[in-house]
Image: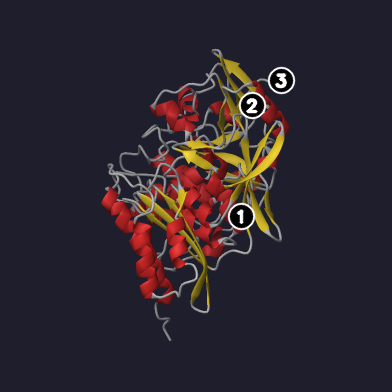
Amino acid sequence: MVAARITVNGKETRISPAAPHTTVLEFLRERGLTGTKEGCAEGECGACSVLVARPGVDRPTDWVAVNACLVPVAALDGQEVVTAEGLATTGESGTPAVLHPVQEEMAVRGGSQCGYCTPGFVCSMASEYYRPDRCAHAGPADGTGSEHGPNGFDLHALSGNLCRCTGYRPIRDAAFAVGMPTEDDPLAQRRDQSPPEPAATAYTQDDSTFLRPATLTDAVRLLRERPDAVVVAGSTDWGVEVNIRSRRANCVVAVDRLPELRTLHVGADHIEIGGAQTLTEIERRLDGAVPLLAQLFPQFASRLIRNSATLGGNLGTGSPIGDSPPVLLALEASLVLADADGEREVPLCDYFTGYRQSVRRPGELIRAVRVPLPLSPVTAFHKIAKRRFDDISSVAVAFALDIEDGTVRKARIGLGGVAATPIRAFAAEAALEGEPWTERTVEAAAGVLRAEGTPMDDHRASAGYRSAMLGQSLLKLYARTTEAVPS
């Protein structure tokens, strides 16, 4: 086995002697690349953002911004990383370096004050700067009233970066001012070359091991042999456990690059989404083909998290406040579970059995999520949280309805944050199906919906508030579907 290595700003270096739980953030700072900062150690502030070369959606390679505080450096064995220091062009002997265009705009437009968060903003901005289809989404010429600038820059790219000094307007101005990459830009040229192939990794240090099997067959065989192993994909959940709770594992198995878990297939009767596709990849590859998922993605954490997080990981944790389960429940999704004995398909509504518990057996992986076709035409995802973006839900509600000739023929409602598990609102569904889509029907069903689940009081919301929001969400959907269309 070749020694684990990582390429940082064009220079290859050995990962050893870093411990397997060492994050990319720690690894970089220990080597003098201190532009990468630790702010929260939870993936919420973006001060640690770096660029990673990943398989592209529209081109061979995409430069993807990720939270370096969450990713174990062993997970980037054989991969390429660029930090804020690596964006600037090194000058000739005796001459200063030339700033990257996003660095230049941040400087001249006052986008940096204390500078702590600036390198992370710069890396997130650079990821969006190099997005191939950016120019196709231009906003208003004056850059106001839209989350897309006149240059196509999507401000959601910065939703995971926090700043306490500038008030954000200078940062937005810088983002909306950057042009398009020039033909001689080396990072732009790099997009036309294939990214590094995932390295089959077996890295052991300090009695701990990080493993990346090459195939699904290898992975499930390994999990049978090592039932104690922690399975990670984007590491957006496990990374928090390592940083905040000082969790350590004797063995970590990475499944994020398994080819069998990175498929996306649209068939005649269902859509199959690989369990290790990142949310950003799913969003861009589906391109709105599943409207309910399209509503979910901008509200799921931040772009930095979505660049690493997977549906398999979000479902695998079994969290009752995960944002994807309510949507997938409303879509009547099922999970394809794989182990060394083969595969089985389980409806998502039968998957959760208790708080962070499921029917998934030891050694099983979520290979794929299947969404049946055709899709219901009336859909909505309502996330009630203290912040518009990058926040944990107090309540999440997803609707998928078939309404024909003014009658509800089919209703599917998924709920999160109101019970020990994500749940289907079966009673509210029954109160709607077969009834006319009228205010009277909806008000009666809203009363039923308020009683679904077992909401509790906590620091995010009271039980009474959660119940009220359940009913209000159905009334909001009704108002949206019946409001007058302007002539």
Q: Is residue 384 left or right of residue 207?
A: left
Residue at position x 38%, y 49% in the image: 453
Q: Position of residue 70 (x, y in %)?
A: 47, 33
Label 1: how many Cα within 10 Å (few below 14, some 14–19, many 20+): many
Label 3: how many Cα within 10 Å (few below 14, some 14–19, many 20+): few
Residue 9 falls in image quadrant: top right
Which amino acid lies under the numbered mark 3 shown in the image of this protein?
Met
Label annotation for residue 196: none
| Residue 96 seen in render | no
Chosen colour scheme: secondary structure
Q: Quadrant of the N terminus?
A: top right
For the image shown, how many numbered marks are present on the structure?
3
Q: Is residue 96 left or right of residue 7?
A: left
Helix, strand or loop at label 1? It is strand
Marks 2 and 3, the one that precedes in the sequence = 3
Q: Which residue is mark 2?
A: 223
Nearest-to-viewer mark from 3 and 1:
1
